[in-house]
Image (spheres, rainbow, N blue to C red):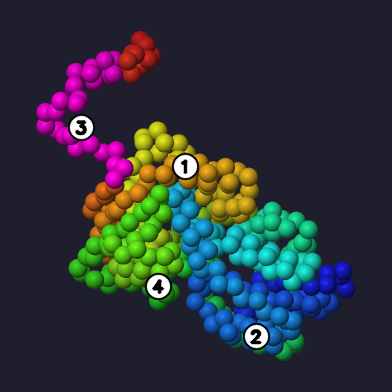
Amino acid sequence: MSDVKRVVLAYSGGLDTSVILRWLIETHGCEVVAWCGDVGQDEDLDEVRTKAARTGAVDCVITDLREEFVRDYVFPAIQANAIYEGTYLLGTSLARPVLAQDQVRVALECGADAVAHGCTGKGNDQLRFELAFQALAPQLRIIAPWREWDLGGRSELMAYAEKHGIPVSATLKKPYSIDRNLFHISYEGGVLEDPWRAPDEAMFEWTTSPLDAPDAPAEVEIGFERGVPVSIDGERLDPVPLLRRANELAAAHGVGRVDIVEDRAVGMKARGVYETPGGTVLHLAHRALESITLDREVMLERDRLSPRIAQLIYAGFWFSPEMDFLRAAVEQSQQRVTGDVRLRLYKGAPSVLGRRSPYSLYSEEIATFEADPSYDQRDATGFIRLNALRLKLQGR
């Protein structure tokens, strides 16, 4: 037996974490507090509580984190245009730090000396949880059963569950793994491990197939204040209902599907299929509004930061000094990103129809092709000559 007396386990009620709960009790002889954070995964949380008690937990704590998740993680990522490898909108990556932060809170409040998770040694989530744990409460011991026990795979977990009378409803055959929250649904593993094989249409739980989407397009207007979404079609909404509404509108028109092969933080490539309907629309609208409100050089510098921010989020460094620094720079860039964007949703493709802002830097008077008093076209001659000087010297 170890010196661990009480551990807070990130618990979902599924096969893996149910086995881990019992394994912690059997291996460490400790009390286990099951903890679950609600980020909109659409699960029966009452059933989670019941399963935890039946499996041996001394308590089960469930925290509603939906508002915090959208307000403090999803919307800042949209402000930063944080998109990993140009495609992935970071749905899972953004949920992990808010979950880890609350798990630490619960561990400290209930006097636990350790935290545990069910992440495997091949994935990114072990980094996202453990880096957060060490940044927020380095005194807590971290237990990662998948890196410690001798249970090799799903069939062995099923056998362990049967031996110990653990109530699980899993089967040995599962075509892929699913992670869901308010921002996205991800599908990985199983039949998707062949990158040549197209996903089965029946797999998608959220979005209408673009082929079956309505023949009539829909228009939607998104309002922003300082880079943060605040309204849809003129109706001001709190973060969670706003994201839900954006999801509903975009999903109905087949918007938000992505199929990519990404570079995991641990070094391997992995295929992921994602549904992020509302997020896709909000990202596009935000970028469109920035096009008229951000100074050219500020946008250039912010665009240098965006891939780095996405990489840090993906690799689990939300609670790091470099992330604090970069987020402060992004927030400064967003002071005048306020206004409205109108989009069309049609057959899986969102497109921008218009944008407006009280802080717009766009001047129709200057941009016009008609004669105007504010721009002397002859000035361009000297501008071109100066910019061409080094090229002419090189050409000689």
Q: Residue at x 79, y 77 (%)?
A: 31
- Mark 4 = which residue? 206
Residue 381: image quadrant is top left
- Circle 2 Cα neighbour tier, 10 Å, few/some/many (<14 / 14–19 / ≥20): many
Left-right relation of 96 to 252: right
User: Which quadrant does the N terminus fall into?
Assistant: bottom right
- Mark 3 = which residue? 366
Q: Position of residue 251 (x, y in %)?
A: 35, 69
The three-letter amino acid code for the residue at tag 4 is Trp
The three-letter amino acid code for the residue at tag 3 is Ile
The Cα atoms of the two marked residues, 3 and 2, are separated by 66 Å
Q: Position of residue 8 (x, y in %)?
A: 72, 71
Q: Residue at x 59, y 73 (%)?
A: 63
Q: Foreground mark, 3 or 1?
A: 1
The three-letter amino acid code for the residue at tag 2 is Lys
Q: Which residues are the magenta region?
A: 358-385
The Cα atoms of the two marked residues, 1 and 2, are separated by 46 Å
- Mark 1 = which residue? 332
> In terms of sequence position, does the residue under pointer 3 or pointer 2 come before the other?
2
